[in-house]
Amino acid sequence: LDASFDGDGMVVTDFGEPFEDANAIAIQRDGKIVVGGSAGCGSFALARYNIDGSLDTSFDGDGKVLTDFGGCDIIKIVASGETFSPFAYDFAIARYNPDGGLDTGFGSGGKVTTDFGGYDAANAAALQPDGRIVVVGNGGANAFLVARYRTDGSLDPTFDGDGKRTVDFNGYGWASDVAIQSDDKIVVSGFGTFSFLFALARLNGDGSLDASFDGDGKVTANPGGDTRKTAVALQVDGCIVLAGTIYHDFDASFAIVRFDSHGTLDPSFGSGGRVITDFGNPEDVGGLCPAARSDCSEDIVSDITIQRDGKIIVVGGAGPCTPTCFTALA
C-alpha cells in the first residue's frame, strides 16, 4: 500500500447515505482520481481525489457530487448507469464540468435517459476520439443493447439510423463492457445464448455488425462452464482479451480468453486460447465468513486492463461461496 496516498494507502468517503457503493474508477490526465457509484436509493455519486488521496475541493466545493434522475439511480461507470422506478428501467447518462457541476449543454440539464422498450440497464460506456459516447447494457430485449450519443447528448442517427442497436446471440445476450478500437470499431463483450457463453460483438462506426469479425460480427467461447459478467481489453496488436467468471460444479473461477483481430481464439494463449485461475478458499475465512463452505469458492471477475508491457491484469473478488470476503488480483 502506498503510504503517500492519505497516509496509509486507503481512503474512505462518506456521502451521508445509509447505503453507498463505488462501482467504477477513472484517472484524469492530471492524475486526479474520479470514482463513481451510488448513494442510497436516489443518486449517482461521484468523488474526485487529488493524487495524495485528499478530496479535491475544486470539484463541487467538497470533492463530492450527488445527481438524482428521479428514480433509484445506480452508476455503473462514470457516468452512465440506470434509473428505475417501479414500472421502468432506462439507460441514464450524466456529464459534468471540471468543477463538478452538471454540463447544461448535454441533454436536459446535463442528464439523458434512453428507453429500449423494456427493463434496460446501462453497464458500461466508452468515449470515441471525436467525443461521441457509446453505452452498452442489457434489458427486456434479451440482447446486447448499444446506444451512441453525440456530444450534446442526443442519440446519434448515423448509428443504425436512430442511435440504438440490439445484438442477440441465438435469442439472448447481456452486454457488460465496451471498448473502442483505434479504427473506431466498437467491441462489446458480455455473455450470450442460453448456454451462457462468453460473447463478443464488433460493430462498424455506422452500427452494422463487422463481417470481418468471425464472418458475422459475433463470436462466442466456452471457457469451461456457465459464464456471467465479462470485461474486455484491447491489445496493441489488435487481439481482444475477455475476462469473466465461469461457474462449474459448486465453484466460480476467473476465466480469460484471447481472440485475434478476426475473432478466432488465439491458440498461443494459455490452453487453446483460454486460461482459468482459481484462488481456492483462503485459510483464514472462519471468523470473517462464518457461513463459508469449505468445499467451494467464488472468484468473481470485476475488470481487466493491459499494462504497457502487454501483461494482463484481472481484478475481482475471491472467497468462499457465501459471502465474498476477499479481494483478488491475477
Image (cartoon, rainbow, N blue to C red):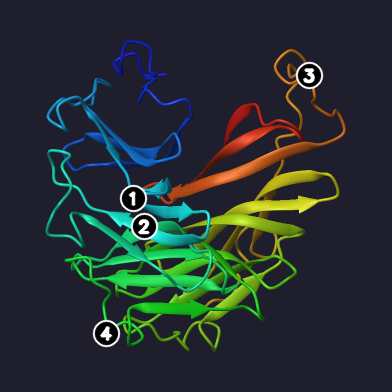
The residue to which callout 1 is attached is 69
Q: Quadrant of residue 15?
A: top left
Q: Which mark is residue 290?
A: 3
Task: Give the tally of numbered discs.
Answer: 4
The residue to which callout 2 is attached is 92
Q: Percent x, y for residue 36?
A: 36, 40
Between tags 4 and 2, which lies in front? 2
Q: Amino acid at mark 2?
A: Ala
Between tags 1 and 2, which lies in front? 1
The residue to which callout 4 is attached is 158
Return the disc, 1 or 2, that comes first in the chain's sequence: 1
In the rendered structure, are the residues bearing label 2 and label 3 in contact, judged by CB atoms less than 8 Å apart? no
Helix, strand or loop for disc 4? loop
Q: Amino acid at mark 4?
A: Thr
In the rendered structure, are the residues bearing label 1 and label 3 in contact, judged by CB atoms less than 8 Å apart? no
Between the C-alphas of marks 3 and 4, the distance is 54 Å
Return the disc, 3 or 4, that comes first in the chain's sequence: 4
Between the C-alphas of marks 4 and 1, the distance is 27 Å
